[in-house]
Amino acid sequence: MSRAVKIILFLVFFEAGLFASYTIVTQQPPNPTDLIEMQINGITSLFNLGTPKIATPNNLKILNKNEVVEALKAKTGVDGINLETLTAQTYQNTNDANITVNITAMGYKDDKSGGTTNVSTIVIKSNETYSITATAVAVSKIDGVKIKVGSIVITSTRILYNR
C-alpha cells in the first residue's frame, strides 16, 4: 500500500472516530463544519508559536521620582526607598492621556542604636527590607510619564529581610 493511501485511510478513520466519540460524549449528532473548524484552528495555532500571546509591559521613565518616593514612604511607613529600584510599567498604549501604571520599589526601615553617655556615636543600620507594589495613574509626557501622586494605591508590601 502506498504512503498516500495510508495517510488518506488514517484521516478517514480519524474523522470517523472523532464523529463517533462526539456522539457518545455529547449524546447529540455531530456538526461536521464545527468539528472540522475546530481541528483547523488547532492546527493553525501550532504554526503560530512564534507570535507572543501574552502582552509584555512597557517600562516607563518616571519624571517625578522624588514626589513618588515621598508618597510611597508616607503610605507604607518605611524610612526610605531605593531610587535605583523604583520602576513603573504599563500594558496600555503610552499615547493615551491617562495611563494606569504598576509601580515597584524596594524600601527599608532603619535600626538606630548608640548615643549613650559614654559613647556619642550613633550607628544606623538597615533593619528591614520591603518590596513595595503600587498602582497609580500617570500622564504621558515626551520623555516619560509623570505620576499623579494622589492616585497612588499600595497593592502589596512584602517584608524581604528582617533582622
Image (cartoon, grey):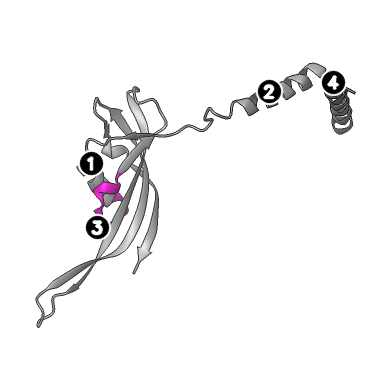
- Crowdedness of circle 1 by 10 Å Cα count: few (<14), some, many (20+)? some
Q: Which residue is mark 2?
A: 41
How far is mark 1 from mark 4, CA to CA? 66 Å
Q: Residue at x 54, y 30 (%)?
A: 53
Counting residues from the start of the chain, the first of labels 1 and 4 encountered is 4
Q: Residue at x 17, y 70 (%)?
A: 123
How far is mark 4 from mark 3, CA to CA? 72 Å
Q: Position of residue 52 (x, y in %)?
A: 52, 30
Counting residues from the start of the chain, the first of labels 2 and 1 encountered is 2
Which residue type carries mark 2?
Asn
Q: Are marks 2 and 1 in contact (CB under 8 Å)?
A: no
How far is mark 2 from mark 1, CA to CA? 47 Å
Q: Which residue is mark 4?
A: 8
Which residue type carries mark 1?
Lys
Tag 2 secondary structure: helix
Which residue type carries mark 3?
Asp
Q: Are marks 1 and 4 in contact (CB under 8 Å)?
A: no
Residue 162 seen in the current view: yes
Counting residues from the start of the chain, the first of labels 1 and 3 encountered is 1
How far is mark 2 from mark 3, CA to CA? 55 Å
Q: Nearer the viewer, mark 4 or mark 3?
A: 4
Q: Nearer the viewer, mark 2 or mark 1?
A: 2
Q: Position of residue 62 (x, y in %)?
A: 26, 37
Counting residues from the start of the chain, the first of labels 2 and 3 encountered is 2
Q: Quadrant of the N terminus?
A: top right
Q: Which residue is mark 3?
A: 79
Question: In the image shown, does 17 or 63 lie closer to the viewer?
Answer: 17
Tag 4 secondary structure: helix
The stretch of residues the image draws in magenta is: 75-86
How far is mark 1 from mark 3, CA to CA? 16 Å
Q: Residue furthest bottom?
A: 118
